[in-house]
Image (tube, rainbow, N blue to C red):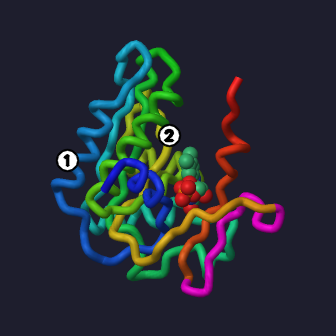
Amino acid sequence: MDIMQLLATRRTYRRFDPKPVPADVIHDMVEAVRLSSCGANRQAVRLVIVARPEDVARVQPLVKWAAYLPAEQGVPAPGQQPTLFVAVVQDTTIPGDLDTDTGIALANLTLAAWAKGVGSCIMGAIDRPRLAQLLGLAETEKLHSMVALGYPAHASHVVPMTESTGIKYYLDENRDYCVPKRSAEEIARYL
Ligand SMILES: Cc1cc2nc3c(=O)[nH]c(=O)nc-3n(C[C@H](O)[C@H](O)[C@H](O)COP(=O)(O)O)c2cc1C
């Protein structure tokens, strides 16, 4: 897939097939983060891979899905839940703009997964205290986000943002996601 096609289809996915994410995809995601650009090459981002089904099940109640949708539309039903979580953690003993570094790492990670057909949802609405305990994080490690992953069970389309759509994603008649995006003219201008 060419890079623009990859970027257009690498959307947020919230319903998944039960098929597990293979080891080579996990390997690629770790590599994608390891190779990320970061301020002063300080490399403060850490990952905790949650792959065992019993551990994945313990994470499920600690993340919040799709704030713009009613639960029956946005929360994955049993059998459609992600099969893998990756915790994205910052080593706070390392100085720098860790949030920028983490954003770049998240983009690389989710693109590497999508290049092999694995969809993702970056999740910031999470129960950090309980997850930090479950993940065994050190005092100096800050949980930035969880990434939910799996093979998508729905499509997601970018649609033009209009006055009637606003910024909120919605489901169409096929229960596929529609994600309004601002026009190129709105987001970029020439000096
Ligand atoms: C930093 C960040 C935090 C997010 N947190 C959540 C979340 O807690 N729950 C959720 O369902 N989606 C979450 N999302 C997904 C966004 O809702 C999604 O990226 C946005 O609606 C645009 O859709 P797109 O990724 O397909 O472009 C998050 C995305 C980002 C980048």
- In the displayed structure, 105 sits above or below 162; it is above
Disc 1: residue Cβ within 8 A of ligand 1's nearest atom: no
Residue furthest to the right: 163
The image shows residue 49, relative to residue 150, as above or below, that is: above
Instruction: Please tell me which of labels 2 and 1 falls first in the chain.
Output: 1
Residue 72, percent across and down? Answer: 61, 82
Q: In the rendered view of the protein, which quadrant contains the N terminus?
A: bottom left
Q: Quadrant of residue 119?
A: bottom left
Identify residue type, mark 1: His
Circle 2 or circle 1, nearest the eye: 1
Segment colored magenta: 163-174
Dot 2 amino acid type: His
Location of the C terminus by quadrant is: top right
Mark 2 Cα-neighbour bin, 10 Å: few <14, some 14–19, many ≥20: some
Q: Mark 2 points at which residue?
A: 144
> Does the rendering let one see residue 139?
no
Q: How far apart are marks 2 and 1 (CA)?
A: 21 Å
The answer to if 103 sits in the magenta stretch is no
Within the magenta stretch, is there residue 167? Answer: yes
Q: Nearer the viewer, residue 8 or 74?
A: 8
Label 1 Cα neighbours within 10 Å, binned few <14 / some 14-19 / many ≥20: few
Q: Residue at x 60, y 69 (%)?
A: 178
On the rendering, which quadrant does ligand 1 occupy?
bottom right
Asked if the residues shown at circle 2 and circle 1 are in contact, with their CB atoms under 8 angstroms apart, the answer is no
Q: Residue at x 52, y 29 (%)?
A: 100
Magenta stretch, main secondary structure, is loop
Give the residue drawn at x 50%, y 40%. Answer: 144
Q: Name the residue under label 1.
A: 27
In the displayed structure image, the side of residue 82 where residue 67 appears, left or right: right
- Residue 93 or 26: which is nearer the viewer? 26
Vertical comparison of 39 with 132: above or below: above
Residue farthest to the bottom, as pictured: 173
